[in-house]
Amino acid sequence: MIRHRPLGSGHPYSVDTEQRHPVVPVEGEPLALGVRTSGDVDAVELEYSVDGGAVRRVALERAQRRSRGQTLDGGHLASAQARLARAQGGWEVRLSGLSRGERIRYRFTAAAQATRWFETTVAGWSPSAEVVGALAGTTTALSDGERIHRVRFALPLEPGEHIAGFGERYDALDFRGSSLDSVVFEQYKNQGAERKTYLPMPFAHVVGGRGWGFHVRTSRRVWFDLGETDSSRLWIETETAADGTVDLAIFEGDPRAVLKAFLDEAGHPQELPDWVFRLWASGNEWNTQAEVMRQADAHRESGIPVGSIVIEAWSDESTFTAWRGARSEPVDRPHRLSDFEFPADGPWPDPKGMIDELHERGIRLVLWQIPLIKMRPHPRGQVAIDAESAIRDEVLVREVAPDGRLRPYRNRGWWFPLGLMPDLTDERAARWWTERRRYLVEEMGVDGFKTDGGEHAWGADLRYLDGSSGDESNNRFPVAYAKAYGDLLRSAGKAPVTFSRSGFTGSQAHGAFWAGDENSTWEAFRWSMFAGLSAAASGILYWGWDFAGFSGDVPTVELYLRSAAAAAFVPIMQYHSEFNHHRSPSRDRTPWNIAQRWGDESVIPVFRRFTELRERLVPYLAESARSAIAAGAPLMRPLYFDHPHDENVWMHPLEWMLGPDLLVAPVLEPGATSWSVYLPVGDWVDAFTGEPVAGGRVVERTVPIEELPVYVRAEAWPRMRAVFQP
């Protein structure tokens, strides 16, 4: 076997063994051509010609086999599969001295085998039409003479300006002096170190100076050099349509004005019901009705109020429509509740009764989803029918096969590999998909969906039902994913409560978000706070994270309670834990499990204190959310939104305002007994002591484990006192 895929898998951060790199050859840069072979091949040769000239032959050298980036980025849990046979089968050759416009025709041979012939044209950078707002003489285009592939230009940066936003980002609040890009990617843990994100946006605030912001109006990939190469220039490079058009919006004003102008384009958040502000509880090992109700009982018995339970491990994890263990005959239509039997000895003997009982207790139910039809192992029964129907009804994202024909796209990531993906950017296909879940909402009473895993669309060779290619529409997919489920809920008379980790420009209008998969470490805690603030600055209003982390062994008591304290003061307060094969000791992030694991009886009363405070805070959060939506402003926001010309706020980046009246400064280091807080100019009141405090300075506050620094605007204290001092 000898295999060459010019475009590779489409992994945005890794080069596959068998691909061409760069995919579009660039004048002055080496061109790497690779193949993957079976183990019996001991030599590979490249045959190529330039502009129809004589065929040349070059031997390839062995190269480490790369498998969709797993050697570089860690990928998801199932990436362990990628470790198999990495060391063999990779070959590569590099060509240099290429000139713009040259047409290269090539193929690979090995013994009696040969690939088909491939062709590509060398592109080069040259001056292009000016982009509005760009510095004179900086705009260049990457063109091969037939089409423009990318455009690059610079915007001016003044001394003292700070750059923030870009969607959800984990490593900083001010990105000046660094570089980043905007492409949806599933970075499993360590997001702050890897600088990759589930929820990017080509939008930013430039704070200080005159105050402005910008939005590159594209769903294609964009790269930003934010004064890293030249401190006076903000370089933008973007993939483009064939004509090289770049649509750049420049917004003038302070951060509030900039964000409102951006949301007027991207879409404003939609108000969600008050229950979303109560505690969300979940664990991947809550995979039976008995366990879910045991945890609900534990909340009640511990006096810890809970507003919603998220069940991840409820389905067969093949169709994502049927409860695990339920019996039904395969049908080529959306299911109804009457199609199912629920064995008394099964994991979910009466899920409808369970949901009804949770509702009677004032607890809402959210079910986990994945936007794929699972195809490994080989599908049978209902999954096979669903796959056949999806292909027949033409509701799937497709890919360009080597022979040029379109075939169903098969997921290229290591999580649910080879799964079929519905084209949720298409309204007909989205209805086809969501109708199969309607019985869950209308007949069973499900209140929302955790729309997980929206990052499976890889590659420019994908084709969506509207004819667009992957480079244009892959980033749009997670936006459409949440919208499709929100539309289902709305059509059933429910609020559009979706809970997503991936998104892009336009996601602001579709539900709530969490920061993705994280370890239980102080470092991940800090990364998550950056994520929440950058997401908020980009217009994401309903945001939270798996407080204290969801992965690995349970957090320490200190990390758990400090993180829970911070979570009480972000829009979504929720805990969650990773599947651990039901091994002992449990890794649940419930307060009773943390207390038991560490032998610390203080955990439950302190946690109860924060959740009771959160319950009292719900009316304030709901009122503040309504006002924020009306004004086009964040609910949780960095201090620079209110004080754009105060340089001190950048020295304390992980403080925020929650609503109009609360300043929050979480304790982010272990062992802290006091914490420095910057209070902007004004009169404040310590929320827990009631002590008046003058602003315009840094104050030092003692921080017992049952408190965190929260300050109330003095004029709001009379009406907020009862929240903190009932």
Image (cartoon, rainbow, N blue to C red):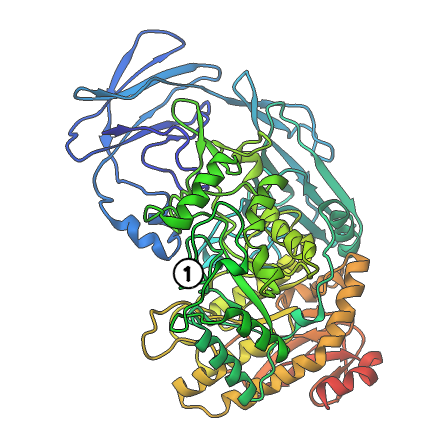
Q: Which residue is mark 1?
A: 327
x and y percentages locating residue 163 in the rendered image: 65, 52
Q: Nearer the viewer, residue 443 or 8?
A: 443
The amino acid beneath tag 1 is Arg
From what the image shows, is residue 247 above or below residue 592? above
In this rendering, the answer to whether 448 lies above or below 419 is below
Q: Quadrant of residue 346?
A: bottom left
Number of on-image labels? 1
Relative to 361, 90 lies left or right:
left
Expressed as whole percent of the image width and height from the top left, the position of residue 515 reads 54, 61
Residue drawn at point x = 58 percent, y = 50 percent: 435
Observer able to see residue 226: no
Q: In this rendering, is residue 630 above or below 65? A: below
Residue found 65% across the figure and 43% down from its top: 232
Q: Residue furthest right?
A: 715
Q: Quadrant of residue 280?
A: bottom right
Residue most toward the bottom? Answer: 601
Residue 554: x %, y % from top left = 41, 76
View extreme (top): residue: 53
| Residue at (73, 84) in percent of width and height | 723
Residue 306 x %, y % = 59, 78
Q: Is residue 63 toward the left or the right of residue 621 in the image?
A: left
- In the foreground, 361 or 303: 361
Image quarter for residue 388?
Answer: top left
Q: Does 433 appear above or below 294?
A: above
